[in-house]
Amino acid sequence: MSHHENNPVIYLKDYLPPAFLADKVELTFDLYPNQTRVKSAIYFTRNEKRESGLPLELHGADLKLISLSLDGQSVSDDRYVLSDDQLVITEVPDRFLFEAEVEIDPANNTSLEGLYRSNTMFCTQCEAEGFRKITYYPDRPDVMSSFTTTVIADKTEYPVLLSNGNPVDKGELDNNRHFVTWQDPFHKPAYLFALVAGDLKLVKDSFTTMSGREVALEIWVEPENLSKCDHAMLSLKNAMKWDEEVYGREYDLDIYMIVAVNDFNMGAMENKGLNIFNSSCVLARADTATDMAFQRIEGVVAHEYFHNWSGNRVTCRDWFQLSLKEGFTVYRDQCFSADMNDAAVKRIEDVSMLRTAQFAEDAGPTAHPVRPDHFIEISNFYTLTIYEKGSEVVRMIANLLGPDLFRKGSDLYFERHDGQAVTVEDFVAAMSEVSGIDFEQFMRWYSQAGTPQLDVSDHYDAETKQYHLTIRQMTPVTKDQQDKLPLHIPVKTGLLNTDGQDIPLILVQGEASGQQGDTDRVLHLREAEQTFIFDQIPDAPVPSLLRGFSAPVKLSFPYSQQQLLHLMRHDSDGFNRWDAGQRLAVDALQTMVSEFESGRVPELDSGLVEAWRNLLGSDLSPAILAEMLSLPEEAYLGEQYDVIPVDGIHACRRIARKTLAQALESELRTCLETHQLSGPYKPDADDIGKRRLNNTCLSYLMTLETAEITERVWQQFNQADNMTDQQAALTMLVHSGQDEKAREALEQFEQQWQQDALVMDMWFQVQARRPQPDALARVKALMSHPGFSLKNPNKVRSLVGAYCGQNRVNFHGLDGHSYRFLADVVLELDQMNPQIASRLITPLTRWQKFDAKRQQMMQTELQRIAQAELSNDLYEVISKALP
Ligand code: B3K
Ligand code: ZN
């Protein structure tokens, strides 16, 4: 564990090109669990972009140096300096061959970074700075090289030996060992290096690219998972085709491999030609995985595949540019999923997540711009801001250019920078060049943190038939930045007449994309305050603002209930139709929360009940209807307050659900009967929508707590042929007040699924989220369950993460026990896996949003953590979060 005082802040402004470039790298791994030997041969050339005479500086961590030579001569002790994280060799020539041998200990590597063991296999995770735990190397993304890798291991225990590129040699060795040599001709940074060794089984397919080349597609898994790979394989083929059609991008190697690993810090990793996946993001079968899991797998498989161009062929100059590959690739995977499924539903899901979690991050102590300008530990910057807000920034660029110019821009970017490590400026320059659009002001989206707030007001002049929209923008101060400047914000706008039809828009003041007379226009907001004037508007319209969520901002407009109902019913923009309903629900729930806080009995506005009744009688698609019937989540409601009334939100949302169920019981039952599914399970958009709608209706009805509904849910739990319905029923039973039924269901589920780690994750999660007050005791008890392990990130997330992050009413219990619990777990975890520890702590860092008593208890725990010897990761987060 390194101490923070040794690990200074790194600044973007200090960037310098590398002193040496690597032309060619040859690696040999002799794999043993505790004593793996890594031999490296690296051909270095001095970089002309830097001054002459600089020493060779290589990164290295947790390595035991065995031997070192330059051009075949061993290096004497006085020519190099070895520290905890570096090897520095002075007086080296301009070109030379560097050779080293090191020893590492994969079996004791619990950080899951570098080379480590997961069950009985060896695997790697190098992004961002994990390669330095494998051998000495300039571990920075702007050093790109070809790699040849030889893997040697026991033939019986590790029959399968994989690395990047194409296999070029293999053979038998003494002592029951064998080897395979892999060659990756594409120059890549070390963070894209990968190696896997294990007793794995193969699911094989192939894809013919648009130029007619055949690519072998391989998914490698543990034997018991062979039946769970079909969906990932189909998703991969769809993604390959989509990237050819939509971006003109073709795959480049002859083989594309995916390996499923149980112990993995994130979702997956885009290593060149050898993606390594968290098993939760590859494995799915109808009876074991929910619809949500199926869709996540489709998205993640595509995301990693799309990185082959946006990330691998064109990579980042330095880690400050992380969103260059991540924001762009998330945008690409979101568009792909929208094309494969229901686009409006996909947008609703993505925006919900952004508005709940990313907005909270952007307002909290770890707020940072899409391109940060400093960090202590880069692993802390794989955030919702880099990924999701980064994607929104690319989406805004795409919307400003339109599809044809955006494609021209991406073509130019990929062609111009193929094989290079580049910056956000290079991406935006390509977009600007093909469109002639000036992005100077827009670039502030990359440098300014915080969620902009738009306050909109309107005025209709019956005399001139003109309609005025005045928009004010303000970005709140964030912990990292005091001064905020106005942004260039695309506000896609429509106006509805009294019949609910879109009015042709003739703009006579203000800048907008599109043609005069179009029914929606993208208004270009640039000033702190600006008025847009529309001409020839026959009657006072209802504005539909920020259609499709055209910018990642909070927008307020003094809508009346009537206006929101009008939008809910008629808006031609599916996203805004949903959003109007959410605004209506937020208003109603906020009213209830004030009643609750002032000791009155909260009552749900009858206007909302009628709106929901109308929804149930409408002809909306099941998927959209399910979204529209769902009340905003507690976390989103919390975001509407400066001080979150945790208990009020929880209580009122429950009351509101029950009120709706009582008032709309017969409509909900009819809806349930109308959308029954038949035939075998299919994870397509239609069936997913129907299952979602049925389970939404059923969970409303479950609040009535009648024996008949409970029996119905119990039957679904028992008889479902798919995990979506089984898991939904389990959740309804466990979260209802009927403890006996809950216990029975959990026992049965455990009996049925105890052999399946991924299904058991759901079993842990459903209990972690249980609203009853016994939740913390249960979570603590479950940590001793044989299926739980603090070393496995999926388990930690399912139990501790789900409890602290999603069970708000219990986590924020006024006894403060949960705060202490989280601090204890994080301190223990930090010793093993700093990346997971520093993520898990998030809920405690958000103390600003709670009342004085809770604030004080949360701060006490943060201070207690700060007293300990911490990893860099946790130290950085704690030091930002402390008052
Ligand atoms: N690029 C990886 C994330 C690596 C995280 C390292 N701490 C997954 C992805 O975004 O595709
Ligand atoms: Zn990514």
Image (cartoon, rainbow, N blue to C red):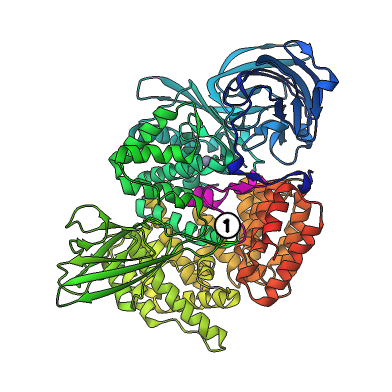
Q: Position of residue 295 (x, y in %)?
A: 46, 47
Assign the N terminus to one quadrant of the image. top right
Is residue 467 placed above or below 450 in the rendered structure?
Answer: below
Decide if residue 196 is on the left or right side of residue 431: right
Decide if residue 734 is on the left or right side of residue 232: right
Assign the C terminus to one quadrant of the image. bottom right
Is residue 753 placed above or below 70 in the rendered structure?
Answer: below
| Front residue of 515 and 232 | 515
Q: Position of residue 459 (x, y in %)?
A: 26, 75
Is 366 colored magenta in this rendering? Answer: yes
Looking at the rendered structure, the kind of residue marked 1 is Ala
Is 463 colored magenta in this rendering? Answer: no
Residue located 36% across and 32% down the image: 411
The residue wearing badge 1 is: 367
Q: Position of residue 289 (x, y in %)?
A: 53, 47
Query: Which segment did they paint magenta?
Result: 365-389
Can you see residue 721?
no
Mark 1 sits near ligand 1, with its Cβ under 8 Å away: no
| Front residue of 248 and 748 | 248
Can you see residue 209?
yes
